[in-house]
Amino acid sequence: MKFLKALKSVNYRLFFAIFATMLFPSVYQTVRIYFLGNLPNEWGISIASQLSWVNLFYEVVQEALILPLFFLLGKSLNNHNELENKIRTGILTTAFIYIVLSALIFIFAKPLVKFMAQNKNLIDETARYIRLETVAALFSTLWRFLFLVFITLKKDFFIYILLGIQAVLSIILDTFLVSTLPVSINLGVNGIAVSNIIVNVCILAVSFFLLSKDGFQIFKKTQLDFSWLKEWFSVGKFSGTESFLRNFAFMMMVVRMVNVVSEQGNYWIANNFIWNWLLLPALSLADVVKKEIAEDQENISSKTFGYICLSCVFALTWIFSISLWKPFLKFVMNVAEYETVFRIALIETGFYITFIFNTCIFDATFYGLGKTNYMLIQSVCIDVVYYGIMFILYCAGIFVPSLIGICLMFGIGMSLDFIPSAILYAHLLK
């Protein structure tokens, strides 16, 4: 009874709204992987998979800028002018930073591809693809900024409109640009980047329109107040540094090593399967926790047990779904080496169970309270100490990379992350 009562405390309206917003991208990403699996050139997935490390650069800045906004925008919900100013100045600041980052990646795309140990025969093609994706990433980040604004304002309908447009446009454009169907112009993997550019520009334009309809005039000629950026960067510096350490460790110790053992395609698909489908409910709950705790700290004591109970449900659902993975990978995602992808996901399962509780309870609470310095502490423990030791073992020839070895190394790191997170969470509750 206590378990069921706790489950009732969860804000399911918000949960399903966020879940739906994450489901749309999962669907079109799956369709995209299906199209890539049909390409006559077997290297399509290997090239597309290199976007995983490119996205890590953007993720660092995103987690420094976007994630703290749950806390900072929540503080201005009752002051329209203050919130409007934060949106306007936030968009400008985000755009400037991402233009600089995109320009650097565009210029140094080829050396970066070489450094990440991509197949030598695919370096030029991969660099071209990455340059196109840097353009798409700029527009993507701006509309994701506005997406968070809509979440903060509880504009569920706007969110559904945007994600519906994203899903429908992505599938239509991928059909005409990427697929092997007779109607396609067969741009191959570069068609994905072109599709992303068009879709992101359209969504950004619609986002500005919807925001103006809701009374927020982004382009009006009034003086901007950038003084709040000091607090933004003060909060964001910890989450940004934490994200840099985490993503740098992941890039060097996982993504690059997967390239070295020539399993980048399978690992990328496995990651897509895990993050777009298996983790979907947990990631949705994590955003609920961030938002509710940012609005009212009392929700920590009144709702956390409900969050834990729902996380248990998600963990059990993950385990019970294992028998469905192979047919899903083979027939829905069109994965040629589905046995290998299945094995990767199975190896990571136990480790990701700890991740569910870590991200839904500990990390989400830290972000909701703006305690990004806590995230930095746990990152130092894992990304500096643990991966530092693994790197030394690799250099000494003790750790020899293999697909299974890399999966275990990454999974153990995730599980160890639970320890400092739990200690910091207990300290926070005192």
Image: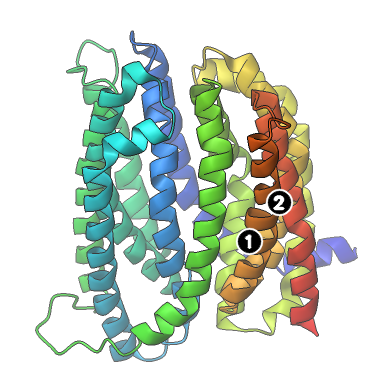
Crowdedness near tag 1: few (<14), some (14–19) or many (≥20) residues, C-alpha within 10 Å: many
Residue 386 - label: 2
Please tell me in which quadrant of the rendered image residue 229 appears. bottom left
Q: Residue at x 68, y 27 (%)?
A: 400
Q: How many marks?
A: 2
Q: Which of the two residues, 8 or 159, is positioned nearer the viewer here? A: 159
Q: Residue 92, how many percent across, how many down?
A: 22, 71
Residue topped by disc 1: 379
Question: Which amino acid type is marked by label 2?
Answer: Tyr
Task: Identify the image's colour scheme: rainbow, by chain, secondary structure or one colour.
Answer: rainbow
Which residue is depicted at the point 30% across and 74% down?
90
Q: Residues within 10 Å of mark 2 (few under 14, many from 20)?
A: some
Label number found at residue 158: none
SS at badge 1 = helix
Task: State the quadrant of the C terminus.
Answer: bottom right
Q: Is residue 88 left or right of residue 385?
A: left
Q: Mark 2: which secondary structure? A: helix
Residue depicted at 69% across the width and 56% down the height:
385
The residue positioned 19% from the left and 78% from the top of the image is 217
Q: Is residue 43 above or below residue 237?
A: above
Q: Amino acid at mark 1?
A: Ser
